[in-house]
Image (cartoon, rainbow, N blue to C red):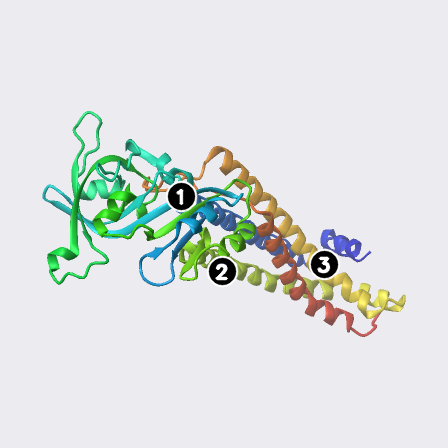
Amino acid sequence: MYLKFAWRYFRAKKSAHAINIIAWVTTGVIAFATCCQVLVLSVFNGFEGLVKSLYSSFYSDFKIVPQKGKTFTLTTAQLEAIKNQPFIKGVSLVAEEKALLENDETQAAVIIKGVDENYNKVSGLPQKIVSGKYDTGTPDAPKGVIGYGVQNAAGIFVDSSLAPATLTITLPKRNTTSTDPMSLISQGNLQASGVFAIQQEFDNSYIITNIGFLKQQMNFGENEFSAIEISLLPGTRESKALPELQKLIPAHTILKSRYQQNSNLYNTMKMEKWAIYAVLTLILIIAAFNMISAITMLVLEKKKDIGILQAMGSPKSAIQKIFLSEGLLLGVLGAGIGISLAILICVLQTRFHFIKLQGGSFLIDYFPVKLQLTDILLVAGTVLFISFTASWFPSYKAAQQSLDLK
């Protein structure tokens, strides 16, 4: 009943056209702000999904790292216990260190990562080769897959028609007691076998090589590693695997999920998303002032109707609900129009990519969008809350008016 009154008041002609204009302007502003919120949140979702897909090509589902220092030891029995878990897809042993790369007279600071033959089971990097092939060689004949940025910085050419470039790697040694400074570092040679391109952070820093070669160069112990990377079988939930793996790792190590390996990145992305959401909510708050004006003027317009309802015995709460419903009606109309328009734009953008990114330096040339039901419900809830808050005061004042039929 209250919505029926509100709808009739919304559609009816007013004695002052300003009331109609303010009501439609309020609806339009709410629709605009709602559309912008859904679109912006969808774009952030799209970029977040893109970045996560890029990082998932390099980072594994879980990673065991030392609690202190750069390395840890893991017994064969502990390693086998991890591998034998039914939800495990692959386990890769890793040795990693900062190094100096030399190619003829060109030098570059890099991170060299030694991996075993199971690395392709835990990482998507082998599928990101843009030149050459994925081949880390053997401990005696090591090869390296280099990042695209490292290739450019060090002037390395990887071409099947040319002889492979021989690179010199200078590394610090571990577990040595010699006082000779020269014995604290080691130099080794490897051949460039391929180039990968994932994301600038990795492309500009990493070389992937054979773990046996790297452990020899750095004087690692037999069961000493920098990390162990673990991938889960498709469909396995991290929350289910996490406690089982926690029981198997030694006390001096830490088990990190994919999120924990990139917590700064994910937290920054979330903060940016909600900061933009908060800014756009200010537009809705501005629209709320228009709503207060529209309902206040409607109360003055319908003063006689209020008196008739009071004379017929309507309680104050019923009169307040009528004008409260008017404010909610404006909010629902605006939110409905805005959300519908945003969904239409997102569907068209997903299908036709008509809104382009400028500059041409990104991996894609259009804005990625991803609609999420939770975002739509959040925006709709925000609109309803602001509409209710804005319409409460004028509706309360309407209910408090004294009976006057003159």
Residues 235 and 352: in front is 235
Cα gap from disc 2 to disc 3, whole angstroms: 26 Å
Q: Name the residue located 49 percent from the left edge and 50 percent from the top edge.
A: 40
Q: Name the residue located 16 percent from the left edge and 51 percent from the top edge.
A: 186
What residue did someone put label 3 on?
A: 326
Instruction: Spot the residue most to the right.
Output: 312
Q: Is residue 24 left or right of residue 178?
A: right
Amino acid under disc 3: Glu
The quarter holding residue 21 reads: bottom right
* Residue 117 image position (x, y, % from top left): 35, 38
What residue did someone put label 2 on?
A: 279
* Tag 3 near tag 1, CB within 8 Å: no
What residue did someone put label 1 on?
A: 54
How dense is the environment of label 1, judged by Cα within 10 Å: few (below 14), some, or many (20 and up)? Answer: some
Amino acid under disc 2: Val
* Residue 376 image position (x, y, % from top left): 60, 50
**Mark 2 or 3, nearer chain start:** 2
Residue 105, visible in the rendered structure? yes
Amino acid under disc 1: Leu
Residue 263's place in the image compared with 307, above or below, is above
* Residue 191 image position (x, y, % from top left): 20, 36
Q: Quadrant of the C terminus?
A: bottom right
**Mark 2 or 1, nearer chain start:** 1
Q: Name the residue located 21 percent from the left edge and 33 percent from the top edge.
A: 158
In the picture, the disc for residue 44 is none
Q: Name the residue located 38 percent from the left edge and 53 percent from the top edge.
A: 74
Residues 139 and 94: in front is 139
Residue 25, visible in the rendered structure? no
Q: Kindly state the secondary structure of the residue where label 3 is placed.
A: helix
Cα gap from disc 2 to disc 1, whole angstroms: 29 Å
Give the mark toward the camera: 3 or 1: 1
